[in-house]
Image (spheres, rainbow, N blue to C red):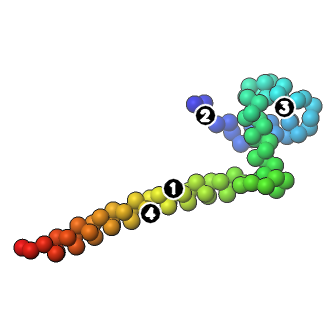
Amino acid sequence: MPPPHPPEFRRRAVELARTGDKSVTALAKSLGISQSCLSNWIRQAAIDEGDLDGLSAGEHKELVELRRKARQLELENEILKRAAAYFARENMLPK
């Protein structure tokens, strides 16, 4: 997978696309990226600016982080439940 393009490159590509001098397809080809990639950048820029509904880049990053934290907490909770059951069973068995 190729490394992501720098934010400044993305911003400049979106600016060029918005000027309308070239079609999105032609501009993407001249920049060496796919048309769908440039279209996604344009859409995300519109969302970040509030022109379209959707998750901004910051909100998406926060959502990913919160989901990762939730999975970690669920795993830790499951481990604690199993440990508690193990020790409760150990105390209940006759010695």
Residue 39: assigned label:
none
Residue under the point 88% across and 39% down = 18
Label 2 SS: loop
Q: Amino acid at mark 2?
A: Pro
Residue 68: assigned label:
1
Q: Nearer the viewer, residue 64 or 17?
A: 64
Classify residue 41 as left or right of residue 89: right
Whether residue 44 is situated above or below residue 3 in the rendered picture: below
**Label 3 crowd (10 A; few <14 / some 14-19 / many >=20):** many
The residue where tag 4 is placed is 73
Q: CA distance from mark 2 to mark 3?
A: 22 Å
Label 3 SS: helix
Q: Are marks 3 and 4 in contact (CB under 8 Å)?
A: no
**Label 4 crowd (10 A; few <14 / some 14-19 / many >=20):** few
Q: CA distance from mark 3 to mark 4?
A: 44 Å
Q: Amino acid at mark 4?
A: Leu
Residue 24: assigned label:
3
Q: Position of residue 11 (x, y in %)?
A: 78, 42
Residue 3: assigned label:
2
First-in-chain label (2 vs 3): 2
Q: CA distance from mark 1 to mark 3?
A: 35 Å
Q: Is residue 11 visible?
A: no
